[in-house]
Image (spheres, rainbow, N blue to C red):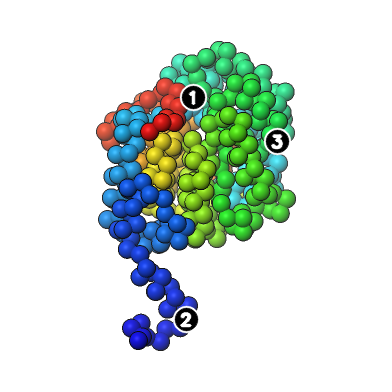
Amino acid sequence: MNIIGNIGNFHRKRIINMMKYRVEDLADRLMAGEALSREEYAFLIDCRTPETEAALAKEAAARRESIYGKKIFARGLIEISNCCRNDCYYCGIRRSNGRCERYRLMPEEILSCAVEGYELGFRTFVLQGGEDDYFTDEILCPLIRTLKERFPDCAVTLSLGERNRESYRRLFDAGADRYLLRHETASEAHYKKLHPAEMSFENRMRCLWDLKETGFQAGCGFMVGSPHQTSRELSEDLAFIAEFKPDMCGIGPFIPHRDTPFASEPAGTVGLTCFLLSVIRLIHPPVLLPATTALATLDPRGREKGILSGANVVMPNLSPENVRSKYDLYDHKAFTGMESARCLADLSGRMREIGCELAVDRGDVRKEV
Ligand code: SAH
């Protein structure tokens, strides 16, 4: 019997494999709360249809609402430094980029961003930056303590890259609540294609487990459409999320930066990013899931599309206006020329338009569902 003709073994295997599942069945199982195998996630990604995208988005938004109501949490993002010792091939602030105009905020400047943010109503501050040797524990711990003393009702989130276990412990003891460290890819072979040999997949994963064990609300994440990524790598990411159960998960499309080795690689898509947001919400319903700046960069309605697919966090920029354009991770990064107050009012209107409500409270992860 040869119903598919003489098309060679490779294609024959692919077609037989494609007949193994029905994408609707996989979507139904995901919506029923079942975890899928890696092979099934990859099939779901490859064979998704506009109907499955819409069905999963609807269910993801409903799951979000059953846990968090209509609230979309706003976090004030303070980009504290674009100095970085690492050389990730995708990132515009990588050490080898001689064209990057470097800056670093001093602790007093970070505090004044927080003061401004607090007045606007923000109750979470996210301190993000390159891996800058200036920000030792000796600098960061007093800063975190001051922030927590001045704003005891606020959460402090750090996103400062890989550090050792003792450092994470000290930052946590100083009062930091959450830590974001995207795993970038859960495939070791793929990790090696995105990073120079001096960086290690094993260490990145170790950091994530250390963060969790230290007591942080921990966030992982990855870029969608990064070079050499296929549905196979994405299926590894989804399986990792199912295992790690992050409190937060940051995903956004890869966008090339002109001064990096990946300058001429194509960007990821809004469609696949939104689909994956829905899948992640369904894999781990309580996760805090941002509709990222990268999504807003590719599409002026990217944030809204992300929320409608199941995201529930937005992170407007609180960095001083004169440094915003310098935290240049990828080309055309959406950095609103608007001052933070107007940006917040604008966001709040946009959220209302899609039936949600912008909430500035701490918005901790709900552990019980
Ligand atoms: N140094 C910190 C913060 C990195 S910047 C850390 O290592 O965690 C935050 C995220 O921006 C990165 O984790 C990466 O996933 C994303 N990013 C970097 N370059 C990008 C690009 N070209 N396109 C899209 N996202 C990018």
Apparent side of residue 65 relative to residue 160 in the rendered image (left or right): left
Apparent side of residue 250 relative to residue 175 in the rendered image (left or right): left
Dot 3: few (<14), some (14–19), or many (≥20) neighbours within 10 Å?
Answer: few
Question: Which residue has dot 3 on it?
Answer: 164
* Alpha carbons under labels 2 and 3: distance apart: 48 Å
Q: Nearer the viewer, residue 162 or 105?
A: 162
Q: Position of residue 200 (x, y in %)?
A: 68, 49
* Alpha carbons under labels 1 and 3: distance apart: 24 Å
Identity, as a three-letter code, of the amino acid under mark 2:
Asn
* Image label count: 3
Dot 1: few (<14), some (14–19), or many (≥20) neighbours within 10 Å?
Answer: many
Question: Which residue has dot 2 on it?
Answer: 9
Q: In this view, does 361 lie above or below 329?
A: above
Identity, as a three-letter code, of the amino acid under mark 1:
Thr
Does dot 3 land on a helix, a strand or a loop?
Answer: loop
Question: Which residue has dot 1 on it?
Answer: 124
Q: Position of residue 241 (x, y in %)?
A: 49, 46
The first of marks 2 and 3 along the sequence is 2
Q: Which of 248 and 89 is in front in this view?
A: 248
The residue at 49%/51% (across/down) is: 239
Q: Quadrant of residue 163?
A: top right
Does dot 2 land on a helix, a strand or a loop?
Answer: helix
Dot 2: few (<14), some (14–19), or many (≥20) neighbours within 10 Å?
Answer: few
The first of marks 1 and 3 along the sequence is 1
Q: Where is residue 73 in the image (x, y as percent from the top left)?
A: 40, 29
Q: Can residue 219 be seen in this view?
A: yes
The residue at 45%/27% (across/down) is: 364
The residue at 68%/34% (across/down) is: 165
Apparent side of residue 322 relative to residue 349 in the rendered image (left or right): right
Q: Is mark 3 within 8 Å of ligand 1?
A: no
Q: Which of label 1 and label 3 is nearer to you?
A: 3
Identity, as a three-letter code, of the amino acid under mark 3:
Asn
